[in-house]
Image: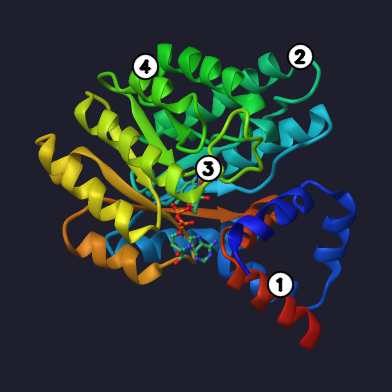
Amino acid sequence: VEVPVLAPVILAASRSDKMRRFVSAAPGTKQVVDRFIAGETVDQVIPIVQDASAKGLEVTLDVVGEDITTVEQSYAARDAYLELIDRLKALGLGTKAEMSVKLSMFGQALEGGHELALANVRPVVEAAAAIGTTVTLDAEDHTTLDSMFAIHEELRKDFPQTGCVIQAYLFRTEDDARRLAAAGSRVRIVKGAYKEPASVAYLDKAEIDKAFVRIVKILMQGEGYPMIGSHDPRLIAISQELARQAGRKLDEYEFQMLYGIRSDEHVRLAAEGHRMRVYTAYGTDWYGYFMRRLAEKPANLLFFARSILTT
Ligand code: FDA
């Protein structure tokens, strides 16, 4: 079964409450979820940060959650990150871990959500800066991005190291990359994980890969700090070559991969002298994140289906 056939179905299910209840309750789900989610609590994720650090890896920590529906939930999201940062500070792990946040979890889609998300994320960015680290704003579906980029620009006035994510599958992204490839900026380029219409995004895998390469080239030739978020061996090799052509040293860009995916490669690239950061998601609201990981690879879905049927 090909990804293009299944992915839109799974991505549609990732936003269905009915499917959320079904998947969450299914026996066997936890076993598969555990591959991608590093734990449910701060206590569970801290040893993973320490272990990564011992292997020469850095992390970006994501408290899972998105598409919240109440203002109280948006405060809870903010507080979960503040608790995490407190713990990193107490353990002296501030410089080993940065944070990734989804603005929809900070209230972006609620009424007055743009201001609410900004007000919630600002103290997190401040607290991160105080322990010597930073925050990257994840990219969600295309309808949220103007607000995300505006919040990013606002935060950068006081915290220029605040990063953001751009998605190669969107037609708009080459322009965004040119705007963002300026001195001091930190930009993560990824293929893109949401269900998008053909009016705004490439749907063909080869087209997305070509756009990814064009954008990496813009970032490498620019003056910012490129973060290459991909597990694709071909795109990683091309990015290394584009970095070399742009005259970048190994510490002038980094690779990023997701916890649980191609873990050997994390260590191999780090051993070659590359900066490698593992996007490490934890928490209880894992449904949306988990479903996007299933949509990326049909084999995951088959494995998941089998584990549900056999437990
Ligand atoms: P591709 O999907 O072609 O995968 C290449 C190879 O990697 C596969 O052949 C397989 O071996 C392995 N692989 C990839 N995904 C796998 C999976 N789920 N399970 C098992 N193996 C898998 N997206 C977004 O829209 N907004 C965001 O903010 C982010 N943030 C982000 C951070 C980081 C650090 C990464 C690595 C990715 C994201 N993404 C994201 C997700 C991204 O858009 C994309 O969906 C995935 O990275 C998969 O694309 P690849 O580039 O890995 O290539």
Query: How many neighbours does mark 4 have within 10 angstroms: few (below 14), some (14-19), or many (20 or more)?
Result: few
Q: Nearer the viewer, residue 87 or 66?
A: 66
Q: Which residue is mark 4?
A: 179
Q: Quadrant of the N terminus?
A: bottom right
Q: Quadrant of residue 247?
A: top left
SS category of the residue bearing label 3: loop
Q: Residue 199, image x and y in percent?
A: 63, 28
Q: Amino acid at mark 4?
A: Arg
Q: Which residue is mark 3?
A: 192
Report the side of 238 relative to 5 (left or right).
left
CA distance for labels 2 and 3? 26 Å
Q: Quadrant of the C terminus?
A: bottom right
CA distance for labels 1 and 3? 25 Å
SS category of the residue bearing label 2: loop
Query: How many neighbours does mark 2 have within 10 angstroms: few (below 14), some (14-19), or many (20 or more)?
Result: few
Q: Which label sits in the foreground, 1 or 3?
A: 3
Q: Amino acid at mark 2?
A: Gly
Q: Amino acid at mark 3?
A: Gly
Q: Which residue is mark 2?
A: 112
Q: Work out whether mark 4 precedes mark 3 in sequence or the reverse, and give the earlier one.
A: 4
SS category of the residue bearing label 1: helix
Is mark 2 in CB contact (under 8 Å) with mark 3?
no
Is mark 2 in CB contact (under 8 Å) with mark 4?
no
CA distance for labels 2 and 4? 27 Å
